[in-house]
Amino acid sequence: MYSMPGLSRVREIKLKTPFGTPSDAYVCGTLEGRKVAFLARHGRGHRISPSELNFRANIHGFKQLGVARIVSVSAVGSLKEEHKPLDFVIPDQFFDRTRHRIDTFFGGGVVAHIAFADPVCGELAGVVEAACEKVGVTGRHGGAYLCMEGPQFSTRAESNVYRELGMDVIGMTNLQEAKLAREAELCYVTVAMVTDYDCWHPHHDSVTVDQILSVLSKNAENASKVVRQAVATMPQERSCKCGSALAHAILTDHKQIPVATKKKLKLIIGKYVKVSGR
């Protein structure tokens, strides 16, 4: 998804964050009368592998732009027969199988433990589910997204174990985004677009590249419709608890937090911790 039908007043914004540079410029504009921002997670041209993504910079950039909600659109493999290619799954759980990734803004003298039992914003998930129904896309709400390290796909043994664990879909990016969005007090939901069955499926090896590309193209078209409808019906105000996720999470004595850390995290913790200076 590198363009969005109906997006107007388009401008690109390149940002720097305390955590480095985001994946690409943010494409900002107006969609259905609402201000939106889009980021190509892997960079335009798909240049950045899942393990190389600067998740902190990407989420912090959205926060800098004043974003309150993130709808993450991602291609996934299906781990269950009922999740067919071209179906969208809106998972409400994640399972971590990554090994090499930074997935918190905290550290450097400040400790925070956010609640993450329910990692997806229920309000936002409901909006996306209703949008799928409205535009005629099969969208199933619920299930678990297994986040693997990659960039290689699963072995058949791994795929079968994930199925035995009850996982629904498998991808390489969304768990870290969800954790950081929660720390940044942003609502987050995943739209997991099924492109194929993972290697567990008996017909997996008969799937051709042309077939996968065809599914990817149709998924992108459907995702544009879903996102546009979701934006059009998004409540003006948030009624969830995502916007106060840090209220009781910062455990460090505020006086003990290093000044440099306070400044680095000003946008994240400034509502709760006094940050002196510019």
Image (tube, helix red, strand yellow):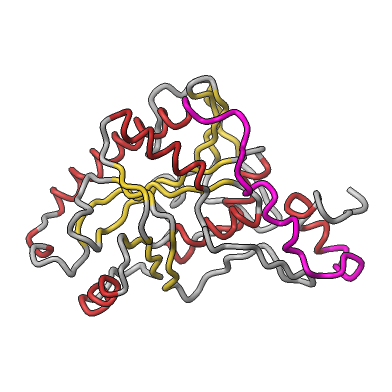
- Where residue 121 sits in the image (x, y, percent)? 52, 48
- Residue at the image position 72 percent from the left and 70 percent from the top: 107
Q: What segment is highlighted magenta in the picture?
A: 232-260
Residue closer to the observer: 164 or 180: 164
Residue closer to the observer: 257 or 213: 257
- Residue at the image position 65 percent from the left and 57 percent from the top: 183
Q: Where 99 falls versus 88 (above or below)? A: below
| Quadrant housing residue 1 | top left
- Where residue 149 sits in the image (x, y, percent)? 40, 70
**Residue 240 within the segment the image draws in magenta:** yes
- Residue at the image position 60 percent from the left and 28 percent from the top: 236
The answer to whether residue 217 is left or right of residue 262 is left
| Quadrant housing residue 256 | bottom right
**Residue 251 within the segment the image draws in magenta:** yes
Q: Main SS type for the magenta part?
A: loop
| Quadrant housing residue 218 | top left
Q: Where 224 falls versus 178 (above or below)? A: above
Number of numbered callouts drawn? 0
Residue closer to the observer: 35 or 249: 249
- Where residue 194 sits in the image (x, y, percent)? 26, 51
- Where residue 150 sits in the image (x, y, percent)? 37, 69
Residue closer to the observer: 169 or 52: 169
The answer to whether residue 215 is left or right of residue 34 is left
- Residue at the image position 87 percent from the left and 65 percent from the top: 254
